[in-house]
Image: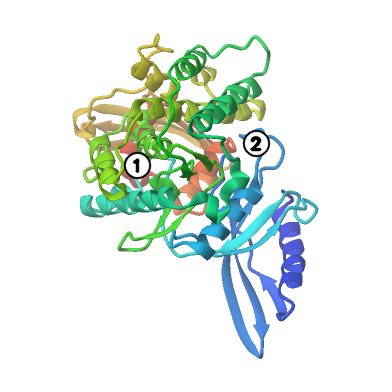
Amino acid sequence: MEDMERVKVKLEAWIAKKMPQATKLSITEPQKPGMGLSSETILFDIKWEESGKQKSRPVVLRAAPQGEGVFPKYELSHQFRIMQILKENTDIPVATMLWLEENPDVIGVPFFLMDRLDGEVPQDYPSYHGSGMYYETTPQLRQKMWMGTLNNLAKIHKLNWKKLGFSFLGEPKNPADAIDRQLTYWERYFEWIKDAPDEKHPTMEATLKWLRQNQYEPERMSLCWGDARIGNTLYSKPDKDVLAIMDWEMAFIGDPTADLAWFFTLDKQHSKGYGLPRLEGTPDEKEIVGHYEEITGWKVKNLLYNEVLSTLRYGGTVIAVLKKFIRQGIPIEKDMILNNFATQHLSDLLGLPAPGAKLYAQEKVDINDLTVTVQFHFTGPGGSDWYLLSDKGKGSRHEGTAKNPNCVITVSVEDWKAIQSGELNRLEAWSTGRLVTDGDLGLLALLEDMMKEFT
């Protein structure tokens, strides 16, 4: 995408054509709430005069990735059409869609605009089990968030997808073909992410083989959200009601159990994958499946198969993102491509050889029982080296460098201040190489409040 100043000027001219009734139209300075790993999101307000009155409309711009993406083909128009159909024909909560622009000449990439709703979303990085709105709320409201999203997931699966016109997502010939389509896509995906024909991904290759050998015929086909999780749900403040189901870029027609498995598998990544305990109020797999069966009237089958498939899908996108970072010169431990949450979890599920050493301790960690050191390398004007020592929950700051720190953070003073104030999203800082972290990220999340105190 072009620089924000040029984007602003071009968007004002483009929106003016969409709103011929508006005069003195302008938009506020575009803001990035964070950098998506597969697409980009920009927020701004449209301001104009109409019939002598001043008007304003907060909107979200969702743009296709520029250059190298996480998927071989990015179907931005599919997302727009899905949410447009849902908004106009169902009670699934989604934002009002405004306009789709598939011509990249306007701002450099295709994009669409939709209304912006005032809510909050559990954060991905650092994990919502370690900090942020989900961490700070009550167990009762955490439970409400999960069940609110799960209720909407069930409603999505109950839709008559053919009648609503979702065949553009690719209509399977029959339920068995729905599974075959998914496996074929991900087999091709792993060929696509390879940098050389002889590149090996032992855990993923063994998993694909297992999935082929254990193919089944599902009892039904549904519209699948594809990325079903609380991190893609917008909740109201402070009641935590579901305001919108977001991010439909991975939607497909298939076995609804695939969505259900993804729903709890991705939470395992945000807990087990960070070495963090799941917070009180977070329902376990049994509770999620039981509630889903109760509200749908369906018996959930082939759950293990779909958890394996979900973990493979997630792992594929992680590998693609890591390879992209490496090509961009962003420091990444190359071992993570073969040894990450997905490959570790698949090895546990299927009894495969371990892809490497365990990344994080899996038992519940209490920071008050540990002595932990976090090393800071602050770069740029005013930069310095110092470390935070947490001795059984009591923190102290020390100048210089520590021996064998548990975690290391490298960032400029300016960017760290922006992260702490909320002006710079941590995911964007990390994914652009402005924030480099190394070591036990689970411990890092547990020390979030202490780091704020000492910096």
**As rendered, which of 32 and 174 lies closer to the eye?**
174
Secondary structure type for disc 1: helix
Q: Is residue 266 visible?
A: yes
- The answer to whether residue 413 is above or below residue 404 is below
Residue at position x 65%, y 41% in the image = 74
The answer to whether residue 113 is left or right of residue 274 is right
The part of the image, by quadrant, that contains residue 265 is: top left
The percent coordinates of residue 64 (x first, y second) are 66, 46
The spot of residue 59 in percent (x, y) is 58, 65
**Residue 199 in the image: above or below residue 142:** above
Q: Residue 405: which quarter of the image?
A: top left
Amino acid carrying label 1: it is Glu
Distance from label 2 to label 1 (Cα)? 31 Å
| Horizontal side of residue 245 vs 73, given as left or right | left
Report the mark closest to the observer, 2 or 1: 2
Tell me, for residue 448, which label it has, or none.
1
| Near-viewer residue (168 or 111) | 168
Q: Earlier in the sequence, mark 2 or mark 1?
A: 2
What residue is rendered at 76% in x and 62% in y? 10
The mark found on residue 69 in the picture is 2
